[in-house]
Structures are given as structure tokens and as C-alpha cells.
Amino acid sequence: MTEFVRTTRLENGVRVVTEVVRDVPSVALGIWVDIGSRYEEERICGIAHFVEHLLFKGTPTRSARGIAEQIERRGGSIDAFTDKEYTCYHARVLHEHAGEALDILADIVLHAEPRSEDIELEREVVIQEILDVEDDPEEFIHDHLLSSYWPGHPLGTPVAGTISSVERISRDDILGFLRDFRRPDRIVIAAAGRLDHDEVVARCRRIFGSLEPRTGIERSLDRPDFRPGLYVVKREIEQAHLMIGLPGLSLIDPRRETAEVLIAALGGGMSSRLFQRIREERGKAYSIYAFQDPFHDIGYTGVYAACARDAVTEVSDIVFEELRSIAHSGLGAGELDRVRTQLVGSIPLSLETTDSRMSRIGRNELYFERPLSLAEIIGSIEAVTNDEIVTLARELFSFERTAAVLLGDVEAGLLALPAT
């Protein structure tokens, strides 16, 4: 798969990265800002997510409705999301409307100043979003694992914050946040699709070139401490939900492709060990998977299962058996080949849309400050050996640093964490 990725840094530090995708009618654009919930004060945690909502309430020249209508009448879409370490405002349109879409995104990011009445209205919306997560066992248990595993650290706090923190956020807090948010050295504009790099750069220079470099709140990369243990959340629901947390790698760790192979073999699909043993062979869970969640300097590994209350012990025993098995002997030759082939084949499939390509080059610029070629990634996956799998599994599947959350009409005695 041929790639046409180019990067230009404007004089003030704004970065523009594009990927030309020929023979498609669309362009996906994203304005990425490397501020997320990790860098917030505890008092006002959730402010980055709150601001994400508020910026769509209008600018001096566009109403909230006008923003949506201007994109949607062209057949396009516009949205945003906040993560632990970054925020992204993005749109996808036919290529002939890409300049207009970039103007709208930039107007939102650079010029929106939420009014007091908009803040109060959207505060209620954000609180309802937090309550919605509380009502979703799978989402809730992910958040609860992190808050238990990394207590007192911003990475352990939900991106949306808490009801009490959102209620505390003032307009002055928001305006102060926006001043820091709009620093050019924190902005990456990513675009993928039917485009010309030089034209995108010229437009970005006109729009963003007047932003003046300045200092502001410096982000801390202090690492959270792991707090192992079993945490039970009593709730009258039909199923029991189990989440097991283990150490993980950072996103920039050179062993990240080894970790991808390891997690895919453990619980990354229908052919994975956990899916086959727990669902296919025993029928003990409908949903069972393993995952990794990497950040700039740390990460964690997770295993999730939803099962009947009386299956919790058996399901957790199988999970720990497989962790021990991989840490002891790794993967069989055929299994390793299958997983590597699976991952290599999934890469082009994951990049079928301009949205996915834009997201890929935007994240790569934020974390690596350079494009990562598909050939480089595929080569690293194909080079993973069983010895590397075993070494990494012994490091990550560390039972003395294991946490588990059990959610439902359950008792702690249903699950025993391994001692070693």
C-alpha cells in the first residue's frame, strides 16, 4: 500500500500532516490538540471534555446550528472527542468542500468563547453523559478499574470527570483553559484524502499563522502507582462483569508490536485463546476479550468478561491459566504465525476510510513527531519471536501487580487473585 504522507511545521510551531489518498471523493480533517484529561487539576477534572462540548455552541460568526448545517448540507459530518492525552475536532467532506470544512473547524477551535447560558445548558448535558456511563456496566467497569488501579492520578479519573468536578467548573476556568489550549506548539492539523499538501499548508498558514507562541500550563508526565487488589461493586443486574488489570507498555515503547501480538493471541478475536476456551468450548460468556490501553509513558493491559454469576470463578481461573501458560512457554509456532498474519492483514482493512487514515497520521505526529510507515509497522510485527513474547508476558502478567473489579450481584469470594 503506497503512502503519500508529508509534514510541514509552520513558523509558530503548528504542524500540518497530510496523506494523499487517490481515487477517493472525500477528505477527512482533524485539528488535534495535545491536551487531554491527564493534564487537568483534580478540582476541575473533566474540563477538556466540557470544553469539547462547548466549542460547538457557536463562534462570533457562526451559530451552533449554522456550524452543523454548513457541514451537513454538503453531505459531510463534524464531531469531536476527548481522550486522556489529546483532543480532536474533526470533519469529513467531499474533497471540493475541504477548505470550507477546515475554516469551520478552525473557527470552532480558535474563536469560540462560550456564553454563561451555554455553559449552564451544556453542564447538564455532560452530567447526563456521566450518568449514562454509570448505567452501562461495560463502560463503568473500565472506568472503575482505572480509578482503583491508579488511584489519585489523572489517568485514573474518567475523561468526562465527575459530577462534582463538572459542577465546579466556572466560566473563568474555561476561558483560562482555552488560552492554554490555543498554543500553536500544541496543535496538529491532519488531513487525509483527495488533497494537495501545499494547498492545505497554505490555507493553514493563513488561518493559524497569526497564533503567537507563548508559555502556559506545563503538562506533567508523572507516572501513576499501581494498586493491586480485588474491588467489588455491588449492583442488582443480571450478569456479573469482570475486569482484570495488569501492567502494560507505553505507546512509544519499541516493544509495542510484540505486545500487539501477545494481546491478540490472548483475547484479540474469535480465534484467540480466551474466546475459544471460555465462549466456544464452555459457553460461559458472550463477551470476552483482552486489550491494551497505552499512554505516552505507561500503559495497562486488561481482560474483560461478562458472564453468569456462577461462572465467575471458572472464567477467572481460565484467564489466569492462560496468562501463566503464555508467560511459561509463549505461543505455538502455528499460533504465532496465525496471529502475526491476522494483525498484518488487519492493517490495510483498518485504513479503508479517510477518517481512519487521518486519525493515524494525527496520532503518529503527536506521539512520534514523524510518520510511521506501514512497512515499518508490518516489518516489526513479522519480526516478533516467541522468545520476545515470553519475555514480555513475564513482565506484564505480573500477579503481584494485578487488580480486578467484579461488578454485579456478587461476592468477593467468587474470585481469588493469584498470589504469584
Image (spheres, rainbow, N blue to C red):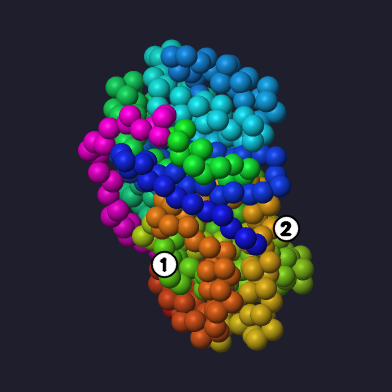
In magenta, the rendered stretch is 205-234
For label 2, the SS is: strand
Nearer the observer, 54 or 230: 54
Q: How many marks?
A: 2
- Quarter of the image holding residue 344? bottom right
Q: Please determine whether, in this image, residue 220 is positioned above or below residue 418.
A: above
- Quarter of the image holding residue 196? top right
Point out which mark residue 253 bears. 1
**What's the CA distance linking mark 2 and mark 1?**
33 Å
What's under tag 2, amino acid-wise?
A: Tyr
* Main secondary structure of the magenta stretch: loop
Q: Position of residue 129 (x, y in %)?
A: 54, 32
Magenta stretch: includes residue 215: yes
Q: Position of residue 137 (x, y in %)?
A: 60, 46
Q: Position of residue 369 (x, y in %)?
A: 40, 55
What's under tag 1, amino acid-wise?
A: Asp
**Mark 2 lies on residue:** 286
**Marks 2, 1: nearer the viewer:** 1
Can residue 309 be seen here? The reply is no
Q: Please determine whether, in this image, residue 407 is positioned above or below residue 392.
A: above
Tag 2–tag 1 contact (CB < 8 Å): no
